[in-house]
Amino acid sequence: MKKLLFILLLFTCCISYSCSGDDTGKEEKTETENLLISKFIVKTGETSIEAHIEQSTRKINAIVPVGTNLKAIQVEVSYTEGATLQPESGYSYNFTQPIIFKLTKGDQTISYEATVTTQPEMLSFDIPDYHIKGEIEGDKINIAFNYGTDLTKITPQIKIADGCTVSPVSGKEVNLSSDFTYIVTNANGQSKSFTVKASLLPQEKVVRGVWVPDPTHTDVLSSFEKLQEFINLLDELNINTIFVATWVREQTLFKSQVLKENSNYSTIEEGWLLNGSNYNGPSGDVIKDLITQAHNKNIKVFFWFEYGFMRSGGANPSANHPILSVHPDWDGRNNQNLAANYNGTDYYLNSYDINVQEFLIQLMEEAIEKYPEVDGIQGDDRLPASPRNSGYNDKTKQAYKLDTGKDVPNDYSNNDWVKWRLKKLNDFCHTWSQRLRNKKENIVIASSPNPYPWCENNLMQDWPSWIKNNDIDLLSVQCYRETSAAYRSTLDETLEHVRQNTQGNILNPGIYLRNTSEWESIFVEQMQYNRACQTNGETFFFNEGLKRDVNKRVIKSFYTGKAIFPL
């Protein structure tokens, strides 16, 4: 009996202890449930955003506007009274990755994972290989590529909102020949699809030119092999026009009877720029082969009369000067009765002498007669041109007095004297243009002067009048500038003068191919600005620069397909 009572007492104690243990566990659970973060505010500038708190998983999620700096997000946190929070409320934190906030009270600690992210947005879609940008409109990306671009191999560079990812990743080659979808996902797993719609622009109708100087600067005319290499390079780069130097230092690229008759050359060959060459082309005539090979690739050829009215020999030409020895009265004179010159370097024949003018026109007519397949003739900053201090030959002074009744003033900037000389050169330009058109009906008359008004103030070139009178079909103003800002300024001023005098799209800016560490970005910006201004292409000075990788790379990025010659 005693044994039975003992067992009953022991059982009762166990039950009492067990019940006591359940109550303690229940208290502890209640304390943990009461420990919580009740509000989590993120501040971005003047804006406060309340985050969503999922208490069951202790996850905090906040979505902030695109462009918010996730590296400096201030938080204001409300939590159980008497508890401590780490990291502390009221400070800014880097939320480029989730942050763990620990809440502690007594010996109880709980953790929340806080994530701050932006909306899943795409900020930019660029194609640096072709220097173009997509236009993002909602969930569509529209992008236009130049004619001829291979859309199956495009490498976009994509910028997305902070804290997001994009698939496929930026920098991966993709096929944009049909609609293509990118998916941007933020840190909360929200995603947004963007559809790229790529298109090709129409084939351009512009002049893409290159100047080829005389044989002392390039060897492309030294052999048929070199000539073929040059034409193939132009074809590879989708260049469609050649301006080849044809009149340099009293010599011509063609064998000229006109030059022989007005010089001390005993043979035609002496006045030939390629005299002594061993050219081995199929026709035996380098110019004929140049035109044939170029035309086979739909490339036009212009004779560039580079020297125009300028002569060689400096301030004191020798008695054996090829032209002045025969025509000493053709030399230009300034107001000090010295050889007329620009900047002490460029010396000129008397551009106002009708016999000198006739000599130049006959040279050009002869070139067309010998090579009727040529597409055009180009003058430049020396044709028609003359130093501002020129015109003081006796013959020119007599002509001025006959026209005006006045003596020529010693001041070469005298307004009436300037206007009279400008008119003489403008009249020459008109005559030159008409004579060449009479020689070949569809000849293209081109000019590459310096920017206006500098060219008038220094070299008496009034090209706005030339284009107003429709004497010039293509104007390749030498916009040779070393910075993008200077180029834009020059082109803007040039366009203003062009638009005031013609409705035709005739401006084809000249770009000097430089060789500096900064050149690639400057070159790209100049090409982009030409397109923004809708110029009639551009022409590069000069062909040797086309061999440099940096220039090839830039040209290919813009000239992705052939262009149609517009004239």
Image: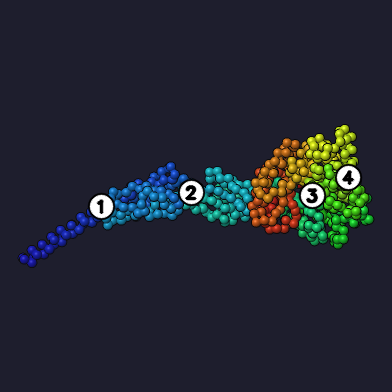
**Which residue corresponds to mark 4?**
356
Who comes first in sequence, dot 1 or dot 2?
1
**Which residue corresponds to mark 3?**
344
Q: Position of residue 476 (x, y in %)?
A: 75, 45
Q: Label 2 sits on what residue type? A: Pro
Q: Residue at x 75, y 53 (%)?
A: 542
Q: Residue at x 76, y 39 (%)?
A: 464
Side of 325 relative to 564 (left or right): right
Direction bottom: furthest residue = 3
Side of 331 relative to 510 (left or right): right
Tell me the tag on residue 30.
1
Who comes first in sequence, dot 4 or dot 2?
2
**Which residue corresponds to mark 2?**
120
Q: Residue at x 81, y 43 (%)?
A: 389
- What whole-number distance in Å separates the C-alpha atoms at marks 1 and 2? 39 Å
For the residue carrying disc 1, how many other residues have a C-alpha within 10 Å: few (<14), some (14-19), or many (20+)? few
Q: Quadrant of residue 496?
A: top right
Q: Label 1 sits on what residue type? A: Thr
- What whole-number distance in Å separates the C-alpha atoms at marks 1 and 4? 111 Å
| Residue 299 seen in the figure | no
Q: Label 3 sits on what residue type? A: Gly
Who comes first in sequence, dot 3 or dot 4?
3
- What whole-number distance in Å separates the C-alpha atoms at marks 4 and 2? 73 Å
Q: Label 4 sits on what residue type? A: Val
